[in-house]
């Protein structure tokens, strides 16, 4: 099964559409969305309609912290000013049924050898970041015997592999280069952000896992970030959110 992995779409319709088209041409069998479907961007309803359609066709989805903040005001506590403003705007745009749909999404999902979560599997409801070997180890331990853990939240692609020593080691993937991910080790992949990459590259990020062959490929997909940025400004959302798309940061 070739599984396309999308995280942190953040209401960026242009980026999501480009990644879905790329995945279709790559011949994926199934789609998984790793949380933060909304927030920051200007197309929450369109993005959720697309994700909902894929879920109806057997796709997988888990809930992110921005999804919660867009559904329930109290869940935006602790966010920075731009994120809080975007969450409130999104909450007003979405229908009541969409907000309920977001809050009913599971925090984690186990599908065969794959464990899906937005942040760390060690505390999925707290949305901890996986940013170093220690936090990667905690997430892998919490995921039980799943050989593959897929997450987002960090907005920069990275792959951790855990060998006999038990300490995960980070690896910076090269876009488009297929990586062997044998079940003899355990793997945690932060797949990057579709809708708001933060590594200085404006191209959208997603990954494709072939769980039968044991391979993983990270992809970067150029998209019309200028159109997405204009929509943010036209909606009256904070200018900083548009600038981040321009700079990939």
Image: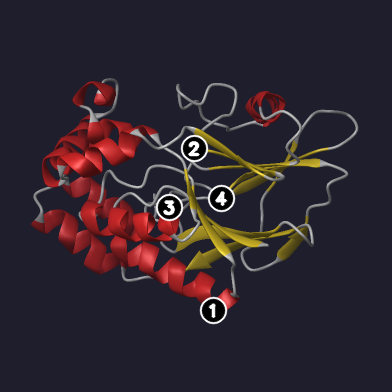
Residue 222 in view here: no
Secondary structure type for disc 3: loop
What's the mark number on residue 118? Answer: 2
Mark 4 or mark 2: whose residue is earlier in sequence: 2
Q: Please give the residue where the numbered disc 3 appears in the rendered image.
A: 197
The alpha-carbon separation of the residues under discs 4 and 1 comes to 19 Å
Q: Please give the residue where the numbered disc 4 appears in the rendered image.
A: 191
**Residue 26 appears in which quarter of the rendering?**
bottom right
Secondary structure type for disc 4: loop
Which is in the foreground here, disc 2 or disc 3? Answer: 2
Q: Please give the residue where the numbered disc 1 appears in the rendered image.
A: 25
Image height check: is 35 above or below 179? above
Where does residue 174 sit, x and y in percent of width and height? 65, 61
Secondary structure type for disc 2: loop
- The answer to whether marks 2 and 1 mark residues whose Cβ atoms lie closer than 8 Å is no
- The answer to whether marks 4 and 1 mark residues whose Cβ atoms lie closer than 8 Å is no
């Amino acid at each position: 099964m070739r599984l396309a992995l999308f995280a942190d779409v953040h209401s960026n319709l242009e980026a999501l559409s480009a990644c879905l088209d790329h995945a279709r041409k790559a011949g994926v069998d199934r789609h998984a969305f790793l949380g933060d479907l909304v927030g920051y961007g200007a197309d929450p309803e369109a993005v959720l309609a697309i994700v909902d359609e894929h879920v109806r066709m057997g796709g997988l989805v888990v809930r992110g912290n921005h999804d919660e903040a867009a559904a329930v005001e109290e869940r935006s506590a602790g966010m920075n000013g731009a994120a809080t403003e975007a969450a409130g705007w999104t909450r007003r745009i979405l229908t009541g049924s969409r907000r309920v749909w977001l809050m009913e999404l599971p925090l984690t999902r186990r599908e065969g050898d794959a464990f899906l979560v937005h942040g760390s599997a060690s505390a999925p409801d707290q949305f901890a970041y996986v940013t170093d070997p220690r936090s990667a180890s905690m997430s892998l331990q919490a995921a039980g015997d799943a050989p593959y853990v897929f997450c987002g939240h960090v907005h920069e692609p990275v792959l951790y592999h855990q060998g006999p020593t038990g300490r995960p080691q980070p690896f910076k993937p090269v876009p488009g280069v297929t990586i062997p991910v044998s079940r003899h080790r355990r793997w945690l992949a932060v797949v990057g952000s579709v809708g708001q990459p933060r590594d200085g590259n404006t191209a959208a990020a997603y990954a494709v896992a072939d769980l039968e062959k044991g391979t993983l490929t990270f992809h970067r997909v150029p998209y019309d970030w200028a159109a997405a940025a204009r929509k943010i400004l036209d909606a009256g959302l904070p200018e900083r959110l548009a600038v981040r798309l321009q700079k990939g940061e």
